[in-house]
Image (spheres, rainbow, N blue to C red):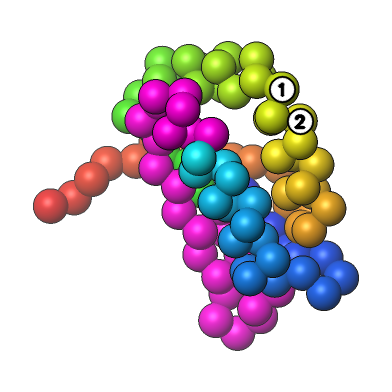
């Protein structure tokens, strides 16, 4: 999970293009990862970004695959041009039914 803030005049509408590119790349990687974007209702410039993996091993495989792609640097550049995020935090979670 990352806590982020849009910079300058960027917002969800501008970032959505980056999200769509990211989703397209994920589909080609054939990796199972869920992405959750949560916008703060009171401060719309703040949002949280979650990547959810089935296991620590699947996260490791994803990171290795992602870093090998040339598009990963382009995506990271687009993301950092539009937002500023703190350090990511890892959480172990359980699905409650």
Q: Residues within 10 Å of mark 2 (few under 14, many from 20)?
A: few
Q: CA distance from mark 2 to mark 1?
A: 6 Å
State the residue lying farthest toward the bottom: 42
Against 19, is 59 above or below?
Answer: above
Q: Residue at x 83, y 53 (%)?
A: 81
Describe the element under mark 1 as helix, strand or loop.
loop
State the residue lying farthest toward the right: 8
Confirm whether residue 3 shows in the render: no
Residue extent of the magenta highlight: 25-49
Confirm whether residue 6 shows in the render: yes
Describe the element under mark 2 as helix, strand or loop.
helix
Picture disc at residue 52: none
Q: Residues within 10 Å of mark 1 (few under 14, many from 20)?
A: few
- The image position of residue 78, as x and y in percent, is 77, 47
Describe residue 65's horizontal placement relative to residue 97 as left or right: right
Question: Could you tell me if the residues under marks 2 and 1 are in contact, i.e. CB atoms within 8 Å?
Answer: yes
Residue mark closest to the camera, 2 vs 1: 1
Q: Quadrant of residue 7?
A: bottom right
- The image position of residue 44, as x and y in percent, is 65, 78
State the residue lying farthest toward the left: 97
In magenta stretch: residue 39: yes
Q: Residue at x 55, y 81 (%)?
A: 41
- The image position of residue 21, as x and y in percent, is 59, 45
What is the number of callouts on the image? 2
Against 8, is 90 above or below?
Answer: above
Against 69, is 26 above or below?
Answer: below
Report which residue position mark 2 lands on: 73
Report which residue position mark 1 lands on: 70
- The image position of residue 85, as x and y in percent, is 74, 51
Q: Residue at x 60, y 84 (%)?
A: 42
């Amino acid at each position: 999970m990352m806590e982020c803030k849009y910079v300058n005049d960027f917002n969800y509408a501008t970032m959505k293009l980056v999200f769509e590119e990211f989703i397209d790349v994920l589909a080609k990687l054939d990796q199972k990862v869920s992405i959750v974007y949560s916008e703060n209702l009171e401060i719309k410039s703040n949002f949280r970004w979650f990547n959810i993996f089935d296991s620590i091993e699947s996260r490791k495989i994803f990171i290795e695959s992602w870093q090998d792609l040339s598009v990963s640097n382009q995506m990271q550049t687009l993301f950092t041009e539009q937002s500023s995020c703190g350090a990511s935090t890892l959480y172990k979670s359980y699905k409650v039914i």
